Amino acid sequence: MRKLYFRSLFVLLAFLCIACTEEEETRPTDLENRAKREIIFSRADSLTQHSTTGVPIAAEWNDLAHWDFWTALLQKQDWTARQTSWKLFPAEKYILVLTDLTGNRIWDAQVTIEDLQGNTLAEGRTDNFGKCILFPSLAYKTIRKTVEYQVKVIYDEQIYYVGKVSSQNPVLYKKINATRKQSNGMDIVFVVDANHMDAETDYLKEELPNILKQVKSESDHQSVRVGGVVYQRQSKTDMIYSFPLNSDVKKMEDLLSWQQSTVDTEFPETLTETLSKAVLSQKWNQKASARLLFLLMDASSQQAGKNSNRLQQMIKTAAKKGIRIIPITSSHIDLDTEFMVRSMAVTTNGTSVFIQNHQPSFNGRPTEPTIGEFRAEPLPSLLTRIILQYSHVQ
């Protein structure tokens, strides 16, 4: 009885701590919080409550919203080593929040950070909350603390030099004399690892029509397109199958149904090539207010450093196009994979999703990712919430 009492007390305290915790600096207004429709469970109890339902349970973790946690993690020895091997250093960020003269958030504006000589260092696009987060030193190990950068905005074919940022003043709020454009559709691409995520792929195939139906009914967009890229290993050959962005969800279902998982862990998947297909070959809507790339994967695609330069270029290109990368991984991924996918999410202004499972270990590593307290949700609800969160125009 005493054990039950203390366990109940622990769960109650955990719930209260989660409910009272405020998000950190990169969500500067309450607008984003109001856009969330979150189902809250404590870490201690959520899996127990849902383990018998047959519905995958997942957790979102946004490193941009927990920046101190992320930067502290990057200073740990194991994570420092991964930064060097992957040649990704996602620690120096600058934020622009852009509005028109009446305070309406300007979404999908092109944003560039330049040095004072006019050289481009990082590019991105404002999200549906008028915010763009850029990483000018992504390829550099040392943060240049004394350097100033200028910020350039292109919106509706007009160029605005909106101010300067530095490590002492990393956030810039700016109003421009422009008329905000109307919402013009949303693009969603799923990149799927069919070698290891067959169960999750099957579930996604079944739930995707329901998710998109709810998104369409609750979003501001008249047009929602979906596309996909599936990669797998067949007879020691990397195979990549692509479905172009289209409003016909049934074709995406057919693509997922056609794939059969043939796990062959001896040979690495070609994630870099797959990302290239998704980022460069898909016909992304240039005027969309939301472009989301869900990356459903379970294993590191290649040895760290093997294709790191090309991977870095794909990340930069995705950020430039305003494509938010949202990895969906199992909770027993190795540290190389965890660092890689979370870095992709951070540097493209995305978020991360971890599917909960009960694997005892993976290569001797604990099954849970290196995150703080999370909010567990049924996977369909979580994906719907994230899509709406990134697409709702204030």
Image (cartoon, grey):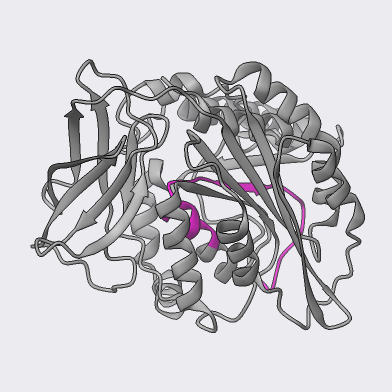
Magenta-colored stretch includes residue 348: yes
The boundaries of the magenta stretch are 341-364
Report the side of 255 relative to 385 (left or right).
right
For image coordinates 10% across by 65% down, the residue present is: 117
For image coordinates 83% across by 43% down, the residue present is: 251
Magenta-colored stretch includes residue 245: no
The answer to whether residue 136 is visible is: yes
The answer to whether residue 135 is visible is: no
Front residue of 19/35: it is 35
Does residue 146 sit above or below 387 in this rendering?
below
> Which quarter of the image is occupied by the N terminus?
top right
> Which quarter of the image is occupied by the C terminus?
top left
Q: Name which quarter of the figure residue 292 lies in.
A: top right
For image coordinates 29% across by 39% down, the residue present is: 157
Does residue 170 sit above or below 336 in this rendering?
above
Report the side of 2 relative to 375 (left or right).
right
So how many labels did they put on this image?
0
Q: Name which quarter of the figure residue 176 lies in.
A: top left
Front residue of 362/256: it is 256
Q: Position of residue 11 (x, y in %)?
A: 60, 29
The single residue placed furthest to the front in the displayed view is 157
